[in-house]
Amino acid sequence: MNTYRAALIGCSRMGAFIDNESPPGRPASSPAGGYEACPRTEMVACADLREDLMEQVGIRYGVPKEKQYLDYREMIDAEKPDIVSVATQPQPRAQIVVHAAEHGVRAIYCEKAMAASLSDADAMVEAVESNRVFLNMGTNWRWEIGYDTMKSVVDSGQ
């Protein structure tokens, strides 16, 4: 069975701590929680501009201080992750995805919104396609039963 080295860029709520809001027993919603739950992934590093958040991610998910980076580029170059999750605000997301795709990352998961502009989204698509990188967007909640139920109610005209 293949195992994959994963890294998190963006260590706040959506990247690591939204799972704290879920009832016990519910599957992980954050990339960090997903890496922890999957026996085929190991979160080897994280990056954020806020050291206090990285420290909390490190404590919670077992990422040592020397694997916590203020610069995602340095992290990608040093750690060579197979998978990167990008849980930042949309504005820097295209630059991060393009860099990751061009520097050996094989799969990238992004939170929504995809990008801050259409030109940013186009640059992301170009980078992942030209480097044969898998890109997945943060649409995991759309499969929740509550959303299906809500859509049914809206569609019914009630």
Image (cartoon, rainbow, N blue to C red):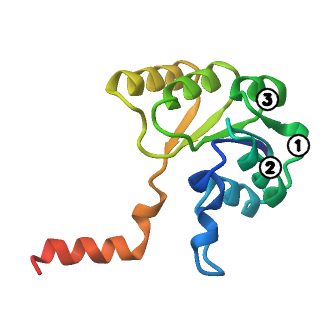
Q: Residue under label 1, please give it.
A: 65
Q: Upstream in the sequence, badge 1 or badge 3?
A: 1
Q: Can residue 48 be seen in this view?
A: yes
Q: Position of residue 110 (x, y in %)?
A: 53, 42
Q: What element carries label 3?
A: loop
Q: Position of residue 49 (x, y in %)?
A: 67, 35
Whether residue 105 sits left or right of residue 108 in the image: it is right
Q: Is residue 41 visible?
A: no
Q: What element carries label 1?
A: helix
Q: Upstream in the sequence, badge 1 or badge 2?
A: 2
Q: What residue type is labelled 3?
A: Lys
Q: Which of marks 1 and 3 is in front?
A: 1
Q: Residue under label 3, please give it.
A: 80
Whether residue 130 sits left or right of residue 156 in the image: it is right
Q: What residue type is labelled 1?
A: Lys
Residue drawn at x 54%, y 23% is 95
Q: Residue under label 2, please give it.
A: 55
Determine whether 129 is above or below 34 in the image.
above
Q: Is mark 2 on a helix, strand or loop?
A: helix
Image quarter hosting the C terminus? bottom left
Q: Cβ–Cβ below 8 Å for labels 3 and 2?
A: no
Mark 2, other Cα within 10 Å: few <14 / some 14–19 / many ≥20: some
Residue drawn at x 50%, y 24% is 129
The residue furthest left is 157
Q: What residue type is labelled 2?
A: Glu
Residue drawn at x 83%, y 25% is 78
Mark 1, other Cα within 10 Å: few <14 / some 14–19 / many ≥20: some
Q: Distance between the residues labelled 1 and 2?
A: 7 Å
Q: Where is residue 149 in the image (x, y as percent from the top left)?
A: 30, 78
Q: Nearer the viewer, residue 95 or 146?
A: 95
